[in-house]
Amino acid sequence: MFRIEPDFEASIIHATVVGATLLAPECQRLFDAVDEAVQLTGIRRVLLEVGADHAIGEPYTDKLRLANRLVNDPTIAHTRFAYVPTRGAEIDPVVEALAKAKGFQGQRFEDPDDALDWLTEADASSTDAGAGRPGSHH
């Protein structure tokens, strides 16, 4: 189960995943919802808190399809993702490695505050006003 909530004040989409296990079809639906939220709000920064284990035993083809989605979907590919495993959740290392190898720019964090800092810095550094700001990287 997941929830998508735009935070207009912070200019971040907050996505939360809870449950015991997250299967590839649910991941696809999650990214459908994130894609829609990005298009409707124009917000291109996503904090994804994952509180459900990925189903590690899923077929490799499902994992590859999910990784491809992260880099080939035009909306998702141009959105900054910071993801944080919560409640001891395990993120499938195969999906993570495949997506990164294909160019996924998301970053994994252990602390949501660090993730928010990175999202904010990433946004500031992509604008002319924020470029080259001293001390902008932790």
Image: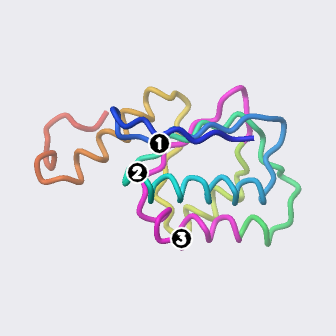
Say which element carries label 3.
loop
Give the residue type at disc 2.
Thr
Residue 73 is labelled as 3
Residue depicted at 53% across the width and 58% down the height: 36
Task: Check disc 3: other Cα within 10 Å, few if <14, some if 14-19, many if 20+.
Answer: few
Say which element carries label 2.
helix
Return the residue at label 1.
Answer: 13
Is residue 89 placed above or below 81 in the rendered structure?
A: above
First-in-chain label (2 vs 3): 2
Give the residue type at disc 1.
Ile
Q: Does the magenta segment cover residue 56?
A: no
Report the colour scheme.
rainbow
The answer to which of 10 and 77 lies nearer the viewer is: 10
Residue 3 is labelled as none
Is residue 75 placed above or below 133 in the rendered structure?
A: below
Task: Tell me where the magenta segment starts and ends, as one range.
Answer: 65-90
Q: Does the magenta segment cover residue 88?
A: yes
Q: Are marks 2 and 1 in contact (CB under 8 Å)?
A: yes
Using the numbered discs, state the Cα–Cα distance from disc 2 to disc 3 in whole angstroms.
Answer: 17 Å
Residue 35 in percent (x, y) is at 53, 59
For the N terminus, the quadrant is: top right
